[in-house]
Image (spheres, rainbow, N blue to C red):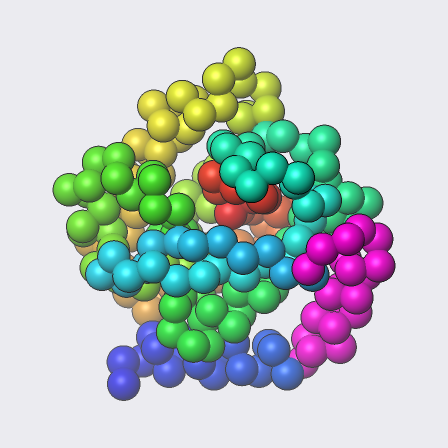
Amino acid sequence: MPLKRLFDIFVSTVAILILFPLLLSVGALVRIESKGPSLFRQTRIGLRGRPFTLLKFRSMSVHERSDPGFTPGATARVTRVGVWIRRTKVDELPQLWNVLVGDMSLVGPRPEVPEWTKVHPERWRTILSVRPGLTDAASLEFRHEEALLAASKDPESTYRDEILPRKLDLAEAYVRDRSFLGDLTLLFVTARAVLATGTGFHAPDGGESPR
């Protein structure tokens, strides 16, 4: 088994065991504040184009419509608990399970919803040759993406024409130059950014909350 995968299994297992009381508490708080499940589930595209279910703690009230469309930057439905878990990135912790079972890695290009992988498909073929990750260079560069989209008159066009191409550049660079030492560096920089700012580092996806 590759060193990267062994490292993912070890770190995600230890983290889940240590954080288990926090995970239970946050799940309960989400359920107490608003109706709906504690976890938000969304289909993403993973290694070699295989879909998987990405997990997050739900940070928004449940939408009455079955298809709310492209909603990044729309924060009106964010709950009080949701504000806190987004700011601290606690909402992302359930993805440790995605890492443990092999859907994701600790470091790698952030997984996208199916519709965005149909944009520039030739580039995605390269990017999807590796497991998607909890964090990458694009996560750091676009850590304020939600605010950028909220300020845009047309968030979908802004994401498609301005943000996504840059993310693809960074993802392709990761695939080309990846190394175990580089992954450790990205993990360190990500942890430092989260602890220093308290505002998170993941960008929004086409869905419930930041990536």
Q: In the drawing, does residue 152 fall left or right of residue 18?
A: left
Q: Position of residue 32 (x, y in %)?
A: 84, 59
Q: Residue at x 20, y 41 (%)?
A: 121
Q: Where is residue 142 in the image (x, y as percent from the top left)?
A: 48, 37
Magenta span main SS? helix
The question of residue 107 being in magenta is answered with: no
Q: Position of residue 22 (x, y in %)?
A: 75, 71
* Residue range highlighted in magenta: 18-37
Q: Which of 167 and 38 is in front in this view?
A: 38
Q: In the drawing, does residue 53 fall left or right of residue 149?
A: left
Quadrant in the picture for the N terminus: bottom left
Q: Which of 64 and 200 is in front in this view?
A: 64
Q: In the drawing, does residue 91 fall left or right of residue 3?
A: right
Q: Position of residue 197 (x, y in %)?
A: 67, 45
The question of residue 19 being in magenta is answered with: yes
Q: Which residue is drawn at 66% across and 53% down?
A: 58
Q: Residue at x 81, y 45 (%)?
A: 80
Q: Which of 137 and 123 is in front in this view?
A: 123
